[in-house]
Image: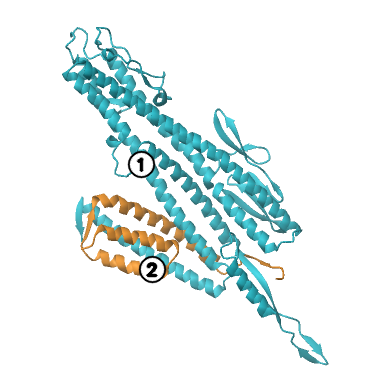
Amino acid sequence: MADQAALNVTAGNVANQNTPGYTRQVVSWQQTDAVTLSGQVYGTGITSTAVSQRSRILEQRVQQQTQTQAQSGALESALQQVENIFGLTSSATSASLTALGTATDAFFNSFSALEANPSDAATRQSVLAAANNLVSVFNSSANQLAQVTSGLDQQIVSVTGQINTLTSTIASLNQQIAHGDSQADAGVLEDQRQYAITQLSQYVGLNQMTTEANGITLTTSNGVLLVSGSQSYAMSTTLVAGTIHVLAGGGGQDVTSGLTGGQLSGILETRDQKLPGYTSALDSFAYGIASAVNAQNALGVDGNGNPGAAIFSLPPTSASAAGSIQVTTSDPQTIAATAPGEGAAGNSNAIALADLAAANLVGTQTATGFLASFLGQIGNDTAGATTNNTVQQATLTQLTSQRNALSGVSLDEEASNLTQYQRSYEAAAKVFSIVNTIMASALNLGVETTVA
Amino acid sequence: MASDHALVEVLDETISALSVLDMSRLETLELQIAGIAGVRLIVHQAEMNLIRAKRDVLEGVLHNSASNLSALNRLYGRDTRDSWEHSAR
């Protein structure tokens, strides 16, 4: 009988090896009570029991790492969308080759062409065409950034719904486990709850506490209740000044700025910390160029002999400038190529307009310099997020392997595994050290070099 | 003479092997990188960014591994396991 039970456990482990959340079972052997008959002691054999073992600590480390990886993954994914908006698909893409860089250069180059032919209608038309193209790129980029924000808002609502489904499931499983009122195997319920918590970890950072009757209490990373015993506390979303905020706990506490870990945190970090900076920089860029060109055009005389008017319409400040900027005219004579008193053939103001390309138009930077640092920032942020997410993914894989390898093994096996892990780490550290030495030598020797 | 691709491959494989703590593979890679360091290696600047990015990933995984191993060693021998018996089959 005991042997048959052991075979059943093995068969169960094989059958469930792909079951999400399944914990491997081991056979525990127990000697049954001996029987004494007429002073003679008789053994009655042994019985076996299927036992599951799960390390609370390892399980929680896997869940914490799942939260960290999900956050970094959400951040990377959103930043890649931003990179795509600006055409930064390759790390080698220079700012001048992007749509924004090309349009900016073409706009200032059109003034250089106007210097040579200030009264030529086609050349003047080219200036307007370049201005319209630049405005189109500004509008499109701002619109796409707004769409990324809108998409992240939709994700927040969707993720919140997923969180509520899972917390409700966990609360229900807490109740079944505590009351033992289910016909299901308690181990199966434990596995289901653990699996649900792992899934929940993908969405939101958690604190986890084991309570009496084998219950689990879950809070957000900043301590707001999600599950307590058989009670779950739904998250919700609400609009605050046009922005979706996340509420949690019985009292509907605003946790938008306090969450760490999980997709939700990565989404909020992108929406509230990264995107506003990019949007603001794009606005400053558009506003800086357009306001300087308007001001310079106003100092000249247009093709009709009138004082130059604004070429671009702009808001009073840089806020929302990239999304709302427009070219005010379709008349090429509006371009003020000549300086006052210069006559129709003059080109002084066209030269001054072309010289704006080298002037500090955006803060203390030229347009080209600002664009390079702006796009460089996006590229660096995305590359950093990609590196971090790769690290977190590899670490999660490692922790999952360790959890699986260390659960339910003897102390001797555990010691042996730990020795192997230590040796693996040392070998990888040696690889890292040697690569560092090679790279340091290569950098010291220049662009293309031979490292001995 | 080895190419910079060899360095990229070693880094890729080391990150992958470290993720699953494949000791034998990592020991082989340790020997392989020692061999690469001993020969004349051409490193193109264009590849340097890629190598640097992979080196940074390896550094991050090593950092996390060290912290993780330290925790596992501290936990060794302690009973942090939940056990439960299953109903009769």
For residue A297, which quarter of the picture? Answer: top left
Residue A153, image x, y percentages: 53, 36
Q: Which residue is at 37% across, 69% downward?
A: B27
Which one is nearer the viewer's eye here, A206 or A104? A104
Judging from the image, what secondary structure is the residue with disc 2 in? helix
Amino acid carrying label 1: it is Gly
- Chain A, chosen colour in render: cyan
Residue at which label 1 appears: A379
Residue B89, image x, y percentages: 70, 71
Q: Residue B25 carries which label?
A: 2
Q: In which quarter of the image is the N terminus of chain A?
A: bottom right
- The answer to whether residue A198 is visible is yes
Query: Chain letter of disc 2?
Result: B
Q: Which residue is at 60% across, 61% downward?
A: A56
Furthest residue in direction right, as rendered = A38
For residue A288, which quarter of the picture? Answer: top left
